Image (tube, coloured by chain):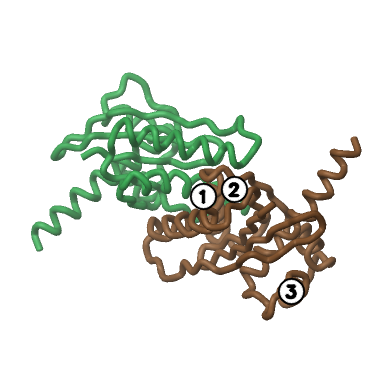
Chain colours: A brown, B green
Amino acid sequence: MVILGIDPGSLKTGYGLIDVEGHVSQHMSHGVIHLKEFKQLADKLSCLYEKISHVILEFQPQHCAIEKVFYSKNAQSMLKLGEARSVSLLAAIHKGVAIYEYTPLEVKQAAVGIGNAPKEQVQRMIQVILKLSNPPFEDAADALAIAMCHAQTYKFKERIDRAC
Amino acid sequence: MVILGIDPGSLKTGYGLIDVEGHVSQHMSHGVIHLKEFKQLADKLSCLYEKISHVILEFQPQHCAIEKVFYSKNAQSMLKLGEARSVSLLAAIHKGVAIYEYTPLEVKQAAVGIGNAPKEQVQRMIQVILKLSNPPFEDAADALAIAMCHAQTYKFKERIDRAC
């Protein structure tokens, strides 16, 4: 099963794709969509939608995992985060990809084993787990961590469902 | 020129359409898209996108006006507002409708003449200006007020452009 993880942001949105077979998760791709250059909101939203749609068409994920967000520095940041989040999700929804949400705590616990792990630790752990030659950039590492979190949670849920 | 005004919200999104010919603005349609019933975020975003797309297909607006938002009661409200806002905008962008943004102060000053006018006054003024038999529901009245604000601002901007 191919999982797309998304770490949305109004200036940079990270994405990461893993292929999960049984207990093995293999890295497929990751990247960062840069949105800072866009002065017009319409151009920014449009670019983000197109880029995520393109990634989905190329790698054909069945599931998309994204972080649930609760707090941010200020109201404007939350508004912009909501905009980036929903546009990314809509691209997935329009391609028939199922959506799953996880809290930042769940993501870090699944990827690093510590809920309050610093960013660098997440990058390093993702590099080790997915056998990458270099640690991915921060936003892409977070996106891969979200995908890894879903892979673990989903497998666990499936085992419970089979046992019932 | 047909203008679509949108008052986005995660529980209710209002829309209003006016047809502007010279100094005359005629009411075309208005309504409220109810989103409270949706438990899943994917269903909510998808429904909002489809409904706004449908309104655009039916009334063929050239411009879409929406409120700029700065503050809200809490971070979660801002996140959800951002989600509803960008999904509405994306529906317009995908249909080639140009986007314009106005502050709440600009909208109320244009529609009622007072920046801090209460909701009821906006509803009543919209009813009078657009010759409606009843005041529209709050969210739809706000959406019509946003469309009216754009009609006035755009005409003024056009006159300045012609004079230069």
Secondary structure under tag 1 reads helix
State the residue in front, B154 or B49: B49
- As drawn, the label of residue B77 is 2
Crowd class of label 3 (few under 14; some 14 to 19; many from 20; radius 10 Å)? few
How many tags in the picture?
3
In 3D space, how far apart are the residues under numbered discs 1 and 2 (Cα atoms)? 22 Å
Give the percent coordinates (x, y) of residue B81.
53, 47
**Residue A41, image x, y percentages:** 40, 58
Q: What residue type is disc 1 on?
A: Ala
Q: Which residue does the image show at 80% across and 61% down from the upper left?
A: A110
- Say which quadrant the C terminus of chain B sits in: bottom left
Disc 3: which residue: A131
| Above or below, A70 relative to B55 | below
Residue A91 is labelled as 1
Query: How far separated are the C-alphas under marks 3 and 1?
Result: 29 Å
Q: Callout 1: residue from which chain?
A: A
Q: Amino acid at mark 2?
A: Ser
- Residue B58, located in which quarter of the rendered image? top left
x, y percent for residue A16: 63, 63
Q: Quadrant of residue A146?
A: bottom right
Q: 10 Å neighbourhood of mark 2: few (<14), some, or many (≥20)?
A: some
- Residue displayed at 29% across by 32% down: B59
Q: Are marks 2 and 3 on the same chain?
A: no
